[in-house]
Amino acid sequence: MIWELLWEHKGKLLGIVAGLFFGCIYLLVGFWHTLVFLVFVGTGFYIGRKLDQKEDLREILDRILPGKFK
């Protein structure tokens, strides 16, 4: 049951874990607090959700940063 749920949303889960990891590193080393941490987690979730929907990573990055990934 739980494994099926995790497998179905593996991109979102991976994105959140990556955001949490980098967010924790930033909080331990840097000075900005929860706001930056939430931006990392939110970005990880957004990219993970797009990957779950089978979108191309280059298309996602091109929408976020136009002209940088052509």
Image (tube, rainbow, N blue to C red):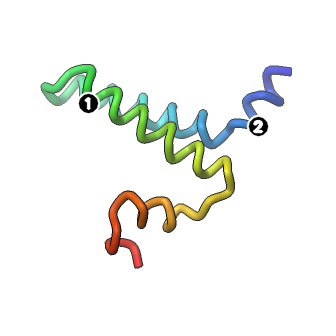
Left or right relative to 34: residue 29? left
Q: Where is residue 44 in the image (x, y as percent from the top left)?
A: 46, 40
Q: What element carries label 1?
A: helix
| Residue at position x 68%, y 56% in the image | 54
Question: In what quadrant of the picture does the N terminus appear?
Answer: top right
Give neighbour class at mark 2: few <14, some 14-19, many 20+ (Cα, 10 Å): few
The image's mark for residue 36 is 1
Residue 69 picture quarter: bottom left
| Residue at position x 19%, y 29% in the image | 29
Find disc 2 in the rendering and name its residue: 8
Q: Position of residue 59 (x, y in %)?
A: 51, 66
Question: In what quadrant of the picture does the C terminus appear?
Answer: bottom left
Amino acid at the residue labelled 2: Glu
Left or right relative to 4: residue 59? left
Residue 49 picture quarter: top right
Q: What element carries label 2?
A: helix
Q: How many marks?
A: 2
